């Protein structure tokens, strides 16, 4: 049995769970009018209401004990101080340094990294201003109107999510496009929307060796050269973001348009770095800096707030409460904000790639569950599809609801309707509907006898389904920065308790290793017989039936 499972803090939570699992949240609310005050936090305008959880004050006390037993406060210091806590890659983990003010000091191997961070930010400022103002133009002298991010995973999902989330701040003269998939359809359909003379491609890849990104970049390059009739056009229409400057120069990108970042920035944590270049161009540097400032504000909160008032710590520990003590296999992210439509996919990577691990920091297989499946869709759309399972399925699915109090599109009653749906959902997930309530409703509808009795079980809702609600005024860059950093730190909290490394991704590396392996066999003249019978047949069927 691992130290974690046998620890007193874990065992105390284990027995507490059996004491309280039959409690009803509706009764907890009915008997304690201060429940919201007890179980909510505010950090400059961002509210976390976690009162609709299956918890008592004792639960929080025991969860905080678990965090203390895991030396969470020490780990937070170690991360912020640039210790190489990503041990399997021997790297520091310093996305937090990317949002530090210029007068800060953060040392990696004895060197302060902040001057480099601000040197690159200055470069981003100059370049994004000159694209937006039309000082830097395309090969034929026309102003840039389309920016196309070519990148995948951590080099795509953050900028995609943030450009969509901050659309109200986006330049009306620019359209941001994102190409990730090696499926040619992705780039082909994007190219159809573009005019080569007014398009800037940003090739974003930490390693600059990723198959999908380089393939798409070469296709885009060939398209551009063909359209503009000159190789010289590449210098004006391509920029790159990478830690691998020798590969960017091999690709032929003008060194002035190459933006650097460092190995201590993990891919999925990189939108704050030069990987955020499309965001800076699209929303402008001042707004990009507001995003960084929001992230920094959450960093300061995370470092300084006591654990019981620490938003990332509370969110992380609640996740552990359900995942490890109630056996929930997934949790849902449900933004009631159309601009946050890519936020669930963004968090899916951030959380599952960080904490989807099976060995601890010492390399021992763990004997407890680590991360759960993360999924979600914007409300109210999800209500008309999968909420059924959350309300009445056999599994408990904890969910985070996120909503702005004010809309950028204040048309009629839309926003009040949106929020009324959001609040009604969390309320009814908590309350449920008892058999007596369901029966009274059916009687009021005129049902009696067998028709009433047979319908009754379907109309009962167990309730007691946990939710968090995060409210903010409007989704501006500063707020988005805080929200992203909140989840980043929440993930770190969980990794500390689980004693796993949240910052490596060997599963992704494995995929990259496999990517080119089968390719020559698909082109082979000879039948393939070196794999298992399934793989051999799949390859051979493709070989026989491919048209081009
Ligand atoms: C992120 C992952 C992964 C990575 C992509 C793209 O943390 O490592 O999603 O971002 O595989 O890698 P490159 O940026 O090196 O192309």
Image (cartoon, helix red, strand yellow):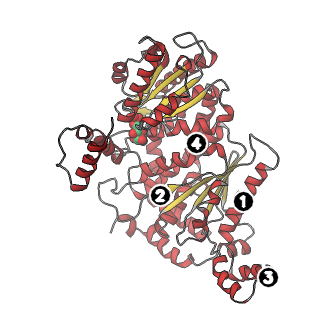
The label shown at residue 217 is: none
Q: Quadrant of ligand 1?
A: top left
Residue on which disc 4 sits: 300
Note whether 334 is above or below 406 in the view shown. below
Q: Secondary structure at mark 3?
A: loop
Whole-angstrom CA distance, mark 3 to mark 2, is: 43 Å
Task: Select label 4 or label 2 by which is in front.
Answer: 2
Q: Secondary structure at mark 1?
A: helix
State left or right for residue 188 relative to residue 168. Answer: left
Residue 340, horizontal then vertical, whole percent? 62, 45
Determine whether label 3 and label 4 are within 8 Å by CB. Answer: no
Residue on which disc 1 sits: 423
Residue on which disc 2 sits: 373
Q: Residue at x 47, y 57 (%)?
A: 373
Q: How many marks?
A: 4
Image quarter of the C terminus: top left
Note whether 404 is above or below 440 in the view shown. above
């Amino acid at each position: 049995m691992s130290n974690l499972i046998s620890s007193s803090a874990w065992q105390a939570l284990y027995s507490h769970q059996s004491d309280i699992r039959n409690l009803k949240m509706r009764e907890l609310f009915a008997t304690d009018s201060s429940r919201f005050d007890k179980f909510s936090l505010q950090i400059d305008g961002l509210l976390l209401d976690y009162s609709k959880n299956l918890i008592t004050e004792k639960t929080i006390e025991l969860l905080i004990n678990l965090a203390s037993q895991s030396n969470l406060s020490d780990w937070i210091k170690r991360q912020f101080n640039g210790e190489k806590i990503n041990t399997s890659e021997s790297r520091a983990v310093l996305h937090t340094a990317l949002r530090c003010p210029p007068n800060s000091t953060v040392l990696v191997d004895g060197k302060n990294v902040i001057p480099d961070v601000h040197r690159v930010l200055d470069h981003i400022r100059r370049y994004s201003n000159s694209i937006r103002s039309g000082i830097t133009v395309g090969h034929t002298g026309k102003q840039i109107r389309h920016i196309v991010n070519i990148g995948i995973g951590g080099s795509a999902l953050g900028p995609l999510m943030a450009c969509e989330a901050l659309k109200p701040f986006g330049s009306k003269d620019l359209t941001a496009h994102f190409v990730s998939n090696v499926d040619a359809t992705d780039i082909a359909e994007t190219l159809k929307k573009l005019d080569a003379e007014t398009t800037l491609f940003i090739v974003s890849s930490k390693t600059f060796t990723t198959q999908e990104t380089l393939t798409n970049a070469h296709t885009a390059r060939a398209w551009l050269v063909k359209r503009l009739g000159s190789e010289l056009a590449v210098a004006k229409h391509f920029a790159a973001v990478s830690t691998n400057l020798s590969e960017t120069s091999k690709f032929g990108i003008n060194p002035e348009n190459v933006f650097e970042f460092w190995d201590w920035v993990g891919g999925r944590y990189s939108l704050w770095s030069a990987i955020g270049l499309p965001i800076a161009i699209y929303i402008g540097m001042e707004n990009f800096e507001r995003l960084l400032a929001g992230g920094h504000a959450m960093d300061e909160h995370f470092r300084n707030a006591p654990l019981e008032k620490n938003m990332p710590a509370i969110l992380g520990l609640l996740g552990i409460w359900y995942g490890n003590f109630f056996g929930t296999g997934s949790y849902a992210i449900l933004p009631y904000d159309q601009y946050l439509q890519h936020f669930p996919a963004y968090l899916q990577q951030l959380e599952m790639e960080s904490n989807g691990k099976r060995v601890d920091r010492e390399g021992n297989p763990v004997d407890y569950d680590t991360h759960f499946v993360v999924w979600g869709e914007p409300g109210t759309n999800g209500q008309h599809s999968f909420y059924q399972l959350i309300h009445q399925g056999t599994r408990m699915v904890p969910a985070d609801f996120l909503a702005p109090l004010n809309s950028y599109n204040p048309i009629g009653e839309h926003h009040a309707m949106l929020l009324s749906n959001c609040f009604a959902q969390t309320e009814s997930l908590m309350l449920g509907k008892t058999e007596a309530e369901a029966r009274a409703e059916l009687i009021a509808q005129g049902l009696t006898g067998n028709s009433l009795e047979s319908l009754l079980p379907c109309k009962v809702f167990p309730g007691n389904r946990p939710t968090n609600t995060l409210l903010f005024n409007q989704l501006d860059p500063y707020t988005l920065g805080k929200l992203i950093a909140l989840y980043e730190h929440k993930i770190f909290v969980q990794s500390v308790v689980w004693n796993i490394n949240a910052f490596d991704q060997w599963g992704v590396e494995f995929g990259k290793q496999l990517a080119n392996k089968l390719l020559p066999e698909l082109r082979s003249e000879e039948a393939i017989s070196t794999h298992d019978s399934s793989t051999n047949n799949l390859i051979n069927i493709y070989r026989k039936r491919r048209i081009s």
